[in-house]
């Protein structure tokens, strides 16, 4: 099971008003274990950044003038998220911005959901904690995730915090303490995060060119013998990169 924790920073609040993505941070989980794979970039939005947004993340157009444009990194980004479940806090916000960036490159690029599945941790938090504050900061406090080192928001830093929160929220039902000596929800959540963090990062081995060629030859042979009904080959063809 491959999951990607994703967060973005933007020039403002509304992509329909021309606001742009200026930072993308992604962290990979495989079978609920952190790997060494990251995707992180700053982007030149080619427009001014609202003062309110800059106060949140500290990024300015002057700092980003030499950064790549979204079109420069889109292939790498799409390949990183392809086929994964994307974990986002308040997913409609980030997905709306990323869809707008893809749309600027042409309709052939489609939408984010064309490449991956999307899971909203804010929706989950509201189901688990109805009537309570469910911002990322509130969840960090509730699940004993240390976030005191964060003075400004940042896509990669917030993705790291969300990874710990997500592992804690989805680690199983926690027993509530009523002065019974049983561990409370916060304690159990902290223990789950600590265990996940102590596990060594998974080493992901990419196939060599010869291995990829042998794989494709095998799929072609299966497709020929099955009358063109090789499901794996159909999925690979459907997931092929779209033209820019």
Image (tube, grey):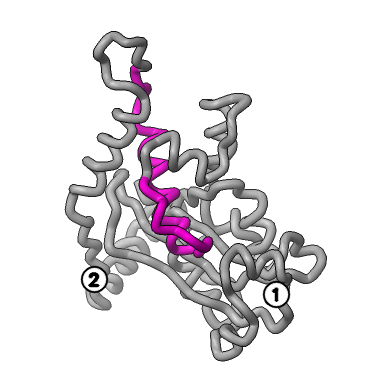
Q: Secondary structure at mark 2?
A: helix
Question: Which of the numbered marks, if any, corresponds to residue 124?
Answer: none
| Residue in the picture at 33% in, 22% down | 184
Q: Position of residue 191 (x, y in %)?
A: 25, 35
Residue 174 lies in what quarter of the image? top left
Please say if 8 is above or below 180: below
Q: Quadrant of the C terminus?
A: bottom right
Let me know if residue 156 is in the magenta part. Answer: yes
Placement of 229 over or under 73, stated as above or below: above
Count residues near mark 1 (Cα–Cα under 10 Å), then give few for <14, some for 14-19, many for 20+: many
Q: Quadrant of residue 38?
A: bottom left
Callout 1: helix, strand or loop? Answer: loop
Q: Position of residue 48 (x, y in %)?
A: 73, 79
> Does 78 sit left or right of 221 as displayed?
right
Residue 67 location (% of width, % of height): 54, 85
Which residue carries the number 1 mark? Answer: 49
Whether residue 105 is visible, yes or no, is yes
Residue tagged by mark 2? Answer: 211
**Label 2 environment density (alpha carbons within 10 Å; few <14, some 14–19, many ≥20):** few
The residue sitting at 36% across, 10% down in the picture is 178
Q: Residue at x 25, y 69 (%)?
A: 207
Residue that lies at the very extreme toward the bottom in this rendered image: 66
- Front position in the image: 56 or 95: 56
């Amino acid at each position: 099971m491959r999951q990607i924790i994703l967060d973005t920073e933007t020039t403002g609040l509304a992509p329909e008003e021309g606001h742009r993505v200026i930072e993308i941070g992604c962290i990979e989980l495989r079978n609920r274990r952190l790997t060494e794979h990251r995707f992180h970039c700053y982007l030149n939005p080619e427009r001014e950044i609202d003062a309110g947004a800059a106060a949140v993340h500290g990024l300015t157009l002057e700092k980003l003038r030499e950064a790549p444009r979204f079109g420069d990194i889109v292939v790498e980004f799409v390949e990183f998220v392809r086929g994964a479940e994307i974990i986002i806090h308040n997913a409609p916000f980030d997905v709306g911005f990323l869809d707008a960036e893809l749309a600027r490159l042409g309709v052939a690029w489609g939408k984010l959901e064309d490449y991956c599945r999307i899971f909203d941790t804010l929706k989950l938090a509201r189901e688990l904690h109805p009537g309570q504050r469910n911002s990322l900061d509130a969840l960090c406090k509730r699940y004993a995730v240390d976030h005191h080192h964060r003075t400004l928001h940042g896509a990669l830093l917030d993705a790291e915090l969300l990874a710990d929160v997500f592992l804690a929220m989805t680690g199983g039902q926690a027993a509530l303490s009523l002065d019974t000596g049983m561990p409370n929800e916060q304690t159990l959540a902290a223990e789950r995060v600590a265990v996940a963090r102590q596990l060594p990062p998974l080493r992901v081995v990419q196939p060599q060119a010869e291995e990829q060629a042998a794989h494709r030859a095998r799929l072609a042979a299966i497709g020929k013998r099955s009358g063109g009904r090789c499901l794996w080959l159909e999925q690979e063809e459907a997931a092929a990169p779209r033209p820019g």
